[in-house]
Image (cartoon, rainbow, N blue to C red):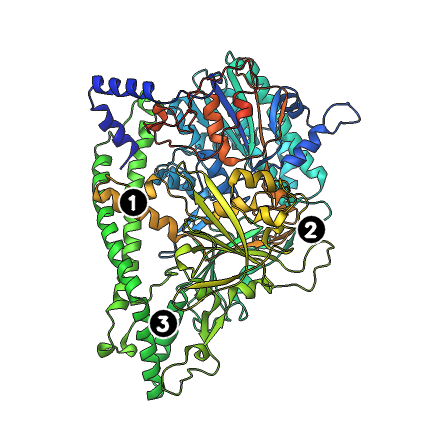
Amino acid sequence: MNRLFFTRQFQRISRWSGRLAIVVLLVTVPAPIASAQVKRLVVVKIDGLPYDLVDQSAKQRDPRTGKSLLPWIDHIFYQRGTRLSNFYVRGMSLSAPSWSLLDTGQHLQIKGNVEFDRYSLYAYDYLNFIPFYIAGAAGARIDMPAVELVDSLKLPLLADAYPHDEHYMTLSLFQRGPRFATLQAGFQNRFAKAPKELFDEWTMGFEFRNFITDQMRRELLSKLGNPKLRYLDLFSPDFDHIAHHNNDRQSQLYALQELDSMLGEIWSAIQRTPQASETALILVSDHGFNSDERVYSQGYNLVKFLASREGGGHHVVTKRRLMLDYSIKGVYPLVPIINTTTPDTYYLKGQGTTYPTALLDFDGNERASVHLRDSDLNMLQIMLQQLQRKDLAPDVRKAVTDAFFATVHRRRAGWEKEVSDINLELGALRRAIAEQQKLWEAQPKKFTKEQQDQGLDDAAKRMYIQVEKWTKQERLYTEYITTVQNLLSLTPATFVPQRMIIETVIKKNCMGDHNTTHQLQNYVVGLSPDGFVLKPDGSLDEQRSFIHLNYFSLLHGLSVRNNVQQGVSNRPVDIIATRLSASQFESLPDSGISDDVIWIDSGDGKQALLLSKTNANGDLSLRYQPITNLTQDENGRITFSLAPWQPGLPLKLFEDPQVIMPTSDRAAWLSEWHTDVEWLHAVHRGQYSNGVIGLQEELARHPIESTSPDEPGLLEDERLMRRFNKRQREIVEADMLIVANNHWNFDVRGFNPGGNHGSFLRISTHSIFMIAGGDKTGLPKPSQIEEPYDSLSFVPTLLALTGNLRDDRKPVPVLWEKGFRRFPGRVVQELVSPHPDNQKITAAGESASP
C-alpha cells in the first residue's frame, strides 16, 4: 500500500529475527562494488547540455588570457576529473523520459513530457510546475507529477537512497516537496537593488530568466556547509531555454560560461568543507541539442494538419497553448487540456470541447505522439447521428442499423472482457482506498521538528494525496466502463436511435481503445460525400460509405513548397514508429522473441521491424529486419514482405560510414541478433546514434514489479492492483510516434528557431556525464572514457561508487528494503576501478534477491 505502512509492519518483527535475517543476507550476497570511498555526491543537472559544444568550448583558448573559454570546467573535469566522451540518452532526447532514466536507473515508464489517458483524457503533465505549487500551497500536493507517477509504480529515485535529512534537492522535474522559500528568496534577491537601478530596469523590462537558478545556487552553496547532507543536486533549465531560441554560438557560449562560473563556485565551496576529499562533483545532462548556426529550425503545424479536411477534420487536444509567444490572450495555467476545434470536421460541428478525436503531444519538438479516437467509435457515432434523422430511406435505415450492430458484435468479446477486468480492478481499488484512508486518519495531525526532519509529515501527506488520486481514477474509469456497458446492452429489438442520447453510449472526452494498424491504415473520419452506399445484397458498403484515411502514407506525404534552406528537406516527417504485438503476425523471421515488435516506417516502402528478446538475466538483444508493405487485415493478421539491406531504410544504418561493424559484410552483421551493448558500440557515432536501442526503449513495454500481476505468491487484491497499474501505463501509449526530419520541429507553441531535441539523432542524444572527486574518492584524474554508455548506467555507477551496489547490479539490502531493484544498465567500470591500486571489493556471481 505505502512504503511507510510497510516500514511500520517490518518494525513489528522481533529485533532478534530481523538481525538474524540481515546477518544471513550479508553472508550470502555478493559484496558491494568498489571500496566505498565516495561519501558525498553533489550532482549538477543541466537540461539539454550537449557534449560536443562543451568539449569544443573547454578546449578552445581565450586569446586574451590563454585560458579555456570554460576555465572551471577545464580545471575540474578536464584536468582533475573524468569525462565520458560517448554518453547518450537511452531513449529519445526528451526531458521527462530522459530525466526519469537518470533519476531511477530503470527502463522507461514515462514515455513523453505529456501523456494522455485515452479513457478519461486525464493529462499527466510532467513539466508543468505551476499547478504543483498552487496545489502545494493548499497542501494538496507534495511532489511533482513525475515523482507521483514513479512513486505509484514503486520506483525510488536516486535521492531516496539517502534518508530525508541527508539529501537536498532543488527545483526539478523530479522534485520532492515544493520549495516556497526558494521562490520567495529568489524574488527578494531579484529586487534587492537600489531604487534607481530598479526603475531603470523597470523601464526596459525585468529580466527573470535566471533568478530561480541563482537562488538555487545560493542555497546549494549554503547547504554544502551541512556535514549531514550526503546527496545534493541542483537542476538548471537555462541552457535549454537559450538554445531553443538562439542558434548563434555567442548566445550559447554565454549560457555555458554562466554555468562554468556556477560550477567554479560549487567546486570552491566543496573544497572548503571537511568532506572535500570524500566528495564527488558530477555534471550530467539529460540529452544534447540539435542546433546549427547555419540553419533556422523549421516548424510544421501538425495541429493545423489534423484539423484540416485532408488530415481528417479532427478536433485536437493538446497540453500546450498554440503559438504562445504570439498570444495576446492570457494563459490560465490550471487548464488540464487545450482544445483546438475546427470548422472542417466531417460530423462533429460544435462538439470540439466534448468530442475531440485526436490527442497530440508535440512537447519534445523533434517528435510528436498522436492518439486518434478508436476508428470504430467514429463509425458508430456517425451511424447513430444518421439514424436519428427522420428522412432516411427504410432500406438504408435497415442496412445502417445492421452495420451498427455488426460493428458492436465484432468488438463485443473484447469490450466485455475489458468491462469485466476493469470492474474487478476497481473493486480492488476501492478496497485500497478504504485501507489508505484508515492509514491517513491514523497519522498524527502535528509533527515535531525531529519528525519533520525525518520527512514523516511529507509521508503522511502522500497518504492523503494517494487517496485523492485513487478516488479520481475510480470515478473516471467507472464513467468509462458505464458507457461501454450501455453500448453493449443495446439490442436490435429495443433500438430506437431517435430517443437515444449519444453520450450515454459513446463517452464524451474519450478516445476508447488503441487503434489497430488496420484501423490506422483505413481510418474512418466521416461519411462519404455520396452518403450511405448499399451493396447489391442490401447490406451497407462500409468502404464506399465512409471516408477512410491511411495515416502512415498521409503523414509521409506531407511536404512544403516554401522551404528555402539548403540541406533541409521539404518533408517534415522522417519516420513513424508504432508498437505491434508478435501474436498478430502471420509469420516472423525468428521465434522466441518478445511480444514487443516495433514497426518503423520511413515512407516510400522503406520499413523495418525491430525485434527483441531477453535472456534469463534480463539482458537485452535486438535484431533489425528490413521489410516492406506491412499491412493488417480486418481479422488482425499482419503480413509483410522481407526486403534486402539498402540505402534509405529507417535510421540509415546501411549507408552511414560512421556505423562501424567488426566485419566488412555490413548486411550480414546488421541482419544478426546483437546485444544492446554490441549495437551501441556499432552505431553510437552514426547519424542516429543509439536509435536502434532508443526506439525499443521508447516504444516497448518494460515490466516492473508493480506492473507484473502474474508473479506467484500475490494476494488477489495485490494482483488486481498491479494489473490496474499495468493498464494505466498501457492506455497512455500513443497510436503513432512521429519523428521529424533533421532541423524540423513540431513545437506549435513557437517553433523554436534556435534548435530542438526529441529525436534519435546523435546531436540530440549525445549528452554529458563528467565527474571529479577528492583524493579519497579513488576517482581517476585526469581521464577520458571512450567506451560508449547510456543513461541507464548513471544511477548504478553512482551507487557503486558509494558502496551501495553489488557486482550483480542489485542494490545492497538496505536499499532493497527501500524498493530499489536490480539495475539493467552497466556500471561504468572505468570509474569504479580505474587503476590496479584502487582495490575492488566484489564477489563473483549472482545470488538470490534479498
* Circles 2 and 1: CB atoms closer than 8 Å: no
Q: Is residue 241 left or right of residue 470?
A: right
Q: Is residue 502 above or below residue 60?
A: below
Dot 2: element? loop
Query: Local crowd at mark 3 within 10 Å, few (<14), some, or many (≥20)?
Result: many
Residue 801: image location, x then y, percent = 48, 22
C-alpha distance separating marks 2 and 3: 45 Å
State the residue position of label 2: 296
Q: What amino acid does circle 1 point to?
A: Pro
Q: Nearer the viewer, mark 2 or mark 3?
A: 3
| Residue occupying image coordinates x 29% and y 58% | 418
Query: Local crowd at mark 2 within 10 Å, few (<14), some, or many (≥20)?
Result: some
Q: Is residue 614 above or below residue 477?
A: above
* Circles 3 and 1: CB atoms closer than 8 Å: no
**Residue farthest to the right?**
63
Q: Nearer the viewer, mark 2 or mark 1?
A: 1
Question: Looking at the rendering, which quadrant does residue 56 occupy?
Answer: top right
Quarter of the picture holding the C terminus: top left
Question: Looking at the rendering, which quadrant does residue 465 occupy?
Answer: top left
C-alpha distance separating marks 3 and 1: 34 Å
Query: Local crowd at mark 1 within 10 Å, few (<14), some, or many (≥20)?
Result: many
Q: What amino acid does circle 3 point to?
A: Leu
Q: State the mark number for residue 380.
A: 3
State the residue position of label 1: 709
Q: Earlier in the sequence, mark 2 or mark 3?
A: 2
Q: Nearer the viewer, mark 3 or mark 1?
A: 1
Q: Earlier in the sequence, mark 2 or mark 1?
A: 2
